[in-house]
Structure formats: structure tokens, C-alpha cells
Image: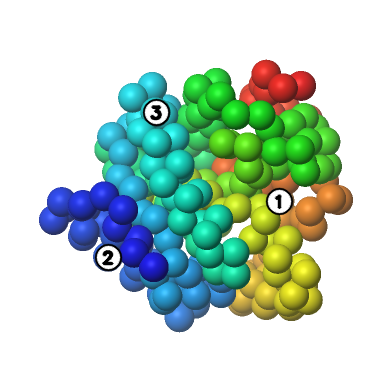
Amino acid sequence: MNYLSTPLSSKNILLLENFKQFISQVYYPCVMAKTVFKREQFDFHVYEEMGAINTTQLILNDLDRYLAKANSNDNEFYSFIATFPNSSFEDETTFETAFWHQLQHLHDLDTEVWDPTVSSDPTDKKFSFSLRGQAFYLIGMHPNSSRIARQAPCPAIVFNLHSQFELLREQGVYQKVRNIIRQRDIELQGSINAMLENFGESSEVKQYSGKPVDEKWKCPFHSKHS
């Protein structure tokens, strides 16, 4: 599958290669991400600044093209990767703030209804972020993340369609893949990411940015569909 939906400059091609090297390292725990990169089943995009209004519209436009391809390949795991090499964050708190600003801007500009298969309430255990009428599981990454697996070469947000995870469940392989990833994460960092819980047990909103949060933490996202 062609992952370069828009031409990349030589500088951005180098950034893509850096991401490939990061994911392809032997120790990298997420076997799904390794497969996606090995098979080149992803859309890779470079944007000026995380949270900027012009960036937000560009992401939505690119997501439309991504969804047209992803929905025509139901049996393929296909990711959308938004990178922000011009943004930098000194710690997980500053990244988390910008991350949720970006998601809020995307939601505010989105004209589609919320995916009816998931909740729009971030406190609901059935919550998933929705854009263009489809639910996504999001992964925030940046060099200063406390989780080694999220220490990407530059700030990034990975969009994975929730329906693709449901397909893995239907195929009976989701739990096996999840357990492999968790075991590899333990081998890499000595512990499982405490924020990672099974879908339906707790709101996945706590997992998105990668920053550890406690019960007092309140998601800053506000849905217009609530």
C-alpha cells in the first residue's frame, strides 16, 4: 500500500527513515507497529506545529484520504501517523497539553457525527475518539516520554481505526497479540504501561498521551456531542 500520499521533502524522508529505524529495533515491544512498518501499511504525514489551526485542517483533509483507503482494505491493519518535527516538549505534561489541544481542535472542526459504536463521554469506559464518523485509538509519542516505546524521534500522534482492533478480536488473535506486546514491554522497561487496560474496563482516554495519570486526573477534552 502506498504510504506516501503526499510527496515528502528530503528532510522529511529522513524523518520517515528515523521512524522506521525506531520501530524496527529488535527490542521494540509493539509487534503490530513492527508489522505495519515492515509491510508499509501506513500514511505518514509531516505538519508544522501541533495544535495550530492550519495544521488541524490539513490533518482532517489527509484523514479523509486515509479513510478512503483504509475502508477499502478491511482486512489490513493500516495506521495514520501525524508527525510534528517543529514542536518540542520538555516533559510529558507540556506534551499532554498540546496533544489534547490538537484533539480538541480536530473535534471542533469535524462536521461528522460521533461514531455510534463508542461513547463521546471521556469518563465512559466505552469512550473512543471519533473523527469523520469513525472511532480511533490514539497513541501520543515524543522523545521525552517516560515509556521507552513512545520515545519517537519527534512528537507524533498515531491514529488506528477501532474497527481494526475489533477485527482482531473477531479473528481470535487480539488477546494473544496483546499479551505478546505486554511481555515484550516488561522485558524492555521492567513493567507494563500502567495506563494500558482492556477496552471496556476503563476509559481508554487515559492511554492516549502516554503520561501516567491517577484517579484525580480529568480529561480536558469536551465533546459537542455529549
Viewer-side label of 3, 2: 3
State the residue at coordinates (51%, 67%).
33
Q: Which residue is mark 3?
A: 57
State the residue at coordinates (39%, 56%).
43
For residue 216, which quarter of the picture? top right
Q: Which residue is mark 2?
A: 17
Q: Earlier in the sequence, mark 2 or mark 1?
A: 2
Of 207 and 159, the residue lying toward us: 159
Label 2 amino acid? Glu
Classify mark 3: residues with Cα within 10 Å, few (<14), some (14-19) or many (20+): some
Callout 2 touching callout 1 (CB < 8 Å)? no
Q: Which mark is residue 195?
A: 1
Callout 1 touching callout 3 (CB < 8 Å)? no
Label 3 amino acid? Gln
SS type, badge 1? loop
State the residue at coordinates (44%, 67%).
41
Q: Position of residue 91 (x, y in %)?
A: 47, 39
For the residues labelled 2 and 1, the Cα–Cα distance comes to 29 Å
Viewer-side label of 1, 3: 3
Q: Quadrant of the N terminus?
A: bottom left
